Amino acid sequence: MDHKTPLIIVGAGAEARAILDLTHHLDVLVYGFISEEAVEGLRELNDISVISQLESEESQQLLADADIQVVMAIPDIESRRDITDFVLGLRPQLTTLIHPQAIISEHSALGQGNVIDAGCLVGPNTIIGEHNFFYPHSSIGPDVRIGDFCTIQSGVRMGKEVEIDDGVYIGMGAIIHPGVGIGAKAMIGPGAVVLQDVPEGKTAMGNPAVIK
């Protein structure tokens, strides 16, 4: 990312504050937050202005400005997808943020709009799509494939050759064994130990994980 170009964070909740903390480690100037919806009385977060709500004329002008970087802070996967599509109608791409304490193999590939927090490890020959959130201390790879709009919570462990489709949510501390495939929009519960493929739209909970 360009450390000299101001950054707008789209979102005004806990994830937005977490991304603000991440920017402090990158020495990035945060211009402000844009809330995805109107919140009465919300004027600032952690001393940074909440400029406007997403659909206002002011916000759309800012989001279209080539001299400003934009990152998503929308936790809900479907909302993140919809808002990202809206924003990408105003500008060509979104910014990727990588915490300096994350370890990303030089032999991996990342798409746009990813947020990778402190202590994350991405192994070699891993391919990560776009607009994913990686919370602190998750371990990925090697030879893993991750799609778009996924959420990988803190402490997740993925073995080699795991394949994660689009829109997957993986809860805190889950373990995905080598070679397992997770279908689109599946949910993996916190602490789950996944030993077999999880079909599209299904939920896996427990140790060993039971698929429902």
Image (cartoon, rainbow, N blue to C red):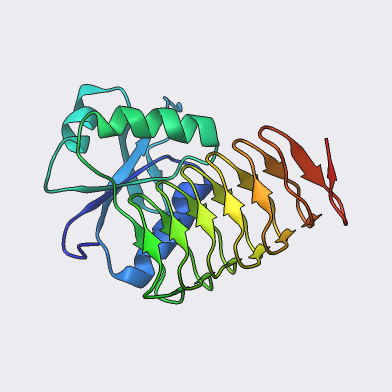
Q: Residue 16: give x, y in percent of width and height.
A: 45, 48
Instruction: Tell whether 8 sits left or right of 173.
Output: left
- 53 sits to left or right of 169: left
Q: Nearer the viewer, residue 162 or 46?
A: 162
Quarter of the figure that contains the C terminus: top right
Q: Residue at x 32, y 27 (%)?
A: 86
Task: Kindly identify the residue that appears in the image at 12 percent across and 44 percent down.
Answer: 66
Between 35 and 173, which is closer to the camera in this rendering? 173
Relative image position of residue 190 (x, y in whole percent): 76, 52
Residue at 37% x, 59% y is 110
Residue 41, can we see it?
no
Horizontal side of 69 relative to 203 (left or right) equals left
Residue drawn where x is 58% and y is 49% of the image: 164
How many numbered marks appear? 0
- Residue 2 x, y percent position in the rendering: 20, 62
Quick check: 21 above or below 8?
Answer: below
Quadrant where the N terminus is found in the figure: bottom left
> Is residue 110 something one can see in this rendering?
yes
Question: In the image shown, does 126 or 131 lie closer to the viewer?
Answer: 126
**Image vertical order of residue 187 relative to residue 177, above or below:** above
- In the rendered view, tell whether residue 40 sits above or below residue 131: above
